[in-house]
Image (cartoon, rainbow, N blue to C red):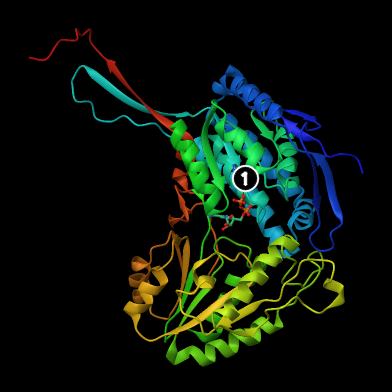
């Protein structure tokens, strides 16, 4: 197998860092071998990016011309939909049906930020003098760092690269150790679409080495990070030291609430999808379930029946719902939490084990698991498990429910199931989270801002203002008649 090259400022070449191997979580087979970026590669990529974004070829490129590149990127992604989806499935084990959606979302993100880029306007605030015109314009930041996790690489990478470039920056991507292939593929696509060299580099490697060197580099002017809260906090410290902005999309422990008047069938289906799609490896996984006691039994019966019907299987085969977890280490973490739930007095209603099917033995599968009998203060209700584990709890009183739903260091998302929209909106207002889904779950629109409350993050991605997170504002005062600046009396 030939070594996969890395992409340094428009040039494909071997990294100068540690050997890195990516494997297919379904069977452990090798996807690619490469040498990661080294610290020298980081320095080179950042220095060349700094030169590239200052070049007239990029600085003076008009928004519609930058947009044209993003449109071509979107078309190229759409043309390679199947190939990219399969690569993403091999990279992290998500079933094809899901990775097709992620590829489509990456194409849509590129197209959306092409449109946003074209319609960006500056401002002409009202002047406070007859002799002045005041202007406010948005300018790029310079070279920016994008650090991404392994659970939805192509989508989370495009969510950073597209607005960063649309805003006129150069961007260095540090993908997760386990999943560098989609970011490298995106580099190929951006180059083919005509992005001038230097404006995009993809530097696979260890977060604590390459990611750390990248964000500390003096020429890096913004950190955009998606990943765990612990890493996010460490990066926020570095950003604070450097006095540069940091956007942080972090972990979650999202509550789903079922009110007494909910449509039980729809709620059970939505809850099942909300926690078990992606094998629960989703920041927004609906991992805490609160069900009104009056509908507890029918809801739980239906949810259990749907969960038992989920097909665990090879992620490239159609019809399978749940692929392997990203790694055996991740599965061990999930198993440790299930053991902890047992110790804390929880009852495992279904799952809780490695599946017995010999066809799944080589991969890191884990059964979808539902636990009851625990209080919201239990550790499995408070810590992010990042696996297919749901803790379900009945509730009687709505104010106690709100207190429990909000009792979390996280505040990423929540779900509400009820036929009463007014009540749902009142509840939504009281939930301390960045996204609330009512009678649905885990649906996204690139036009709608996304981000977390509390320790689930800082800043928002997506939406019209998503591009502004990659820009700085400059105000200009223009004197329309000759003026002499005077000391005020
Ligand atoms: P992680 O924090 O371990 O790693 C994320 C990225 O940061 C990787 O590229 C990693 O190499 C890099 N990194 C690690 N240490 C670093 C350091 N010291 N300096 C610089 N970079 C460093 O997270 P993960 O395990 O890859 O992903 C799972 C986490 O991501 C979960 O907590 C999940 O909730 C979160 N996540 C959040 C969102 C969101 O939008 N809020 C989306 C997806 C995943």
Q: Is residue 9 visible?
A: no
Corner quadrant of residue 61: top right
Q: Quadrant of residue 211?
A: top right
Q: Residue lying at the far front in this picture: please name it.
A: 343
Task: Please give the name of the residue rendered at 59% of the width and 40% of the height, measured from the top-left corner.
Answer: 146
- Which residue is most to the right? 1
Residue 33 visible here: yes
Where residue 217 appears, as percent x and y from the top left, is 57, 29
Query: Residue 197: x and y, percent?
Result: 69, 25
Closest to the observer: 86 or 314? 314
> 9 or 342, which is in the foreground?
342
Q: Residue furthest left?
A: 489
- Tag 1 secondary structure: helix
Side of 245 where 151 appears, left or right: right
Q: Is residue 238 above or below residue 423?
A: above
162 shown above or below 320? above
Q: Quadrant of residue 20?
A: top right
- In this picture, residue 69 sits left or right of residue 421: right
Position of residue 423 in the picture relative to residue 464 (left or right): left
Residue named by callout 1: 158
Quadrant containing the C terminus is top left
Whether the residue carrying mark 1 lies under 8 Å from ligand 1 is answered with: no
* Residue 133, image x, y percentages: 27, 21
In front: 307, or 60?
307
**Up-down: is 309 above or below 10?**
below
- The quarter of the image holding the N terminus is top right
| Most foreground residue, 190 or 372 | 372
Residue at coordinates 58% horizontally, 77% vertically from top-left?
A: 341
Could you say where residue 25 lies in the image, as x and y percent from the top left?
79, 60
Q: Residue at x 68, y 47 (%)?
A: 176
């Amino acid at each position: 197998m030939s070594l996969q090259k890395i992409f340094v400022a428009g040039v494909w070449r071997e990294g100068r860092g540690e050997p890195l191997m990516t494997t297919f979580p379904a069977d452990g087979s090798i996807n690619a071998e490469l040498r990661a970026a080294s610290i020298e590669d980081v320095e080179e990529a950042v220095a060349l990016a700094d030169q590239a974004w200052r070049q007239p070829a990029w600085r003076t490129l008009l928004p519609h011309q930058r947009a044209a590149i993003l449109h071509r990127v979107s078309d190229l992604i759409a043309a390679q939909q199947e190939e990219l989806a399969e690569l993403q499935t091999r990279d992290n084990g998500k079933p094809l049906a899901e990775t097709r959606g992620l590829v489509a979302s990456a194409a849509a993100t590129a197209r959306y930020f092409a449109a946003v880029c074209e319609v960006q306007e500056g401002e002409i605030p009202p002047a406070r003098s007859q002799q002045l015109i005041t202007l406010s314009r948005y300018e790029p930041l310079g070279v920016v760092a994008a650090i991404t996790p392994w659970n939805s690489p192509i989508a989370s990478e495009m969510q950073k690269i597209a607005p960063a470039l649309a805003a006129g920056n150069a961007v260095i991507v540090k993908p997760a150790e386990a999943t560098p292939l989609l970011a490298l593929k995106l580099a190929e696509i951006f180059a083919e679409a005509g992005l001038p060299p230097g404006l995009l580099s993809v530097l696979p490697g260890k977060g604590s080495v390459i990611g750390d060197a990248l964000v500390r580099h003096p020429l890096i002017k913004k950190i955009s990070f998606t990943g765990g809260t612990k890493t996010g906090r460490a990066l926020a410290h570095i950003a604070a030291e450097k006095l540069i902005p940091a956007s942080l999309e972090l972990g979650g422990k999202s509550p789903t609430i079922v009110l007494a008047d909910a449509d039980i069938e729809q709620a059970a289906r939505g809850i099942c999808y909300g926690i078990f799609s992606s094998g629960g490896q989703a920041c927004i996984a609906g991992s805490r379930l609160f069900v009104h006691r009056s509908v507890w039994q029918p809801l739980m019966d239906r949810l259990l029946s749907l969960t038992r019907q989920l097909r665990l299987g090879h992620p490239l085969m159609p019809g399978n719902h749940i692929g392997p977890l990203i790694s055996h280490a991740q599965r061990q973490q999930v198993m440790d939490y299930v053991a902890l739930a047992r110790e804390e007095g929880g009852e495992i209603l279904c799952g809780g084990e490695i599946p017995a099917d010999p066809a799944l033995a080589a991969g890191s599968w884990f059964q979808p698991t539902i636990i009851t009998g625990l209080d919201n203060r239990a550790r499995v209700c408070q810590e992010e498990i990042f696996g297919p584990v749901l803790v379900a709890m009945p509730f009687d009183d709505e104010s106690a429910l709100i207190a429990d739903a909000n009792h979390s260091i996280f505040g990423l998302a929540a779900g509400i199931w009820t036929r009463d929209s007014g009540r749902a909106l009142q509840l939504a207002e009281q939930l301390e989270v960045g996204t609330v889904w009512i009678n649905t779950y885990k649906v996204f629109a690139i036009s709608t801002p996304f981000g977390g409350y509390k320790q689930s993050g800082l800043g928002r991605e997506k939406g019209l203002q998503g591009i502004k997170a990659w820009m700085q504002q400059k105000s200009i005062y223009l004197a329309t008649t000759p003026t002499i600046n005077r000391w005020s009396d």
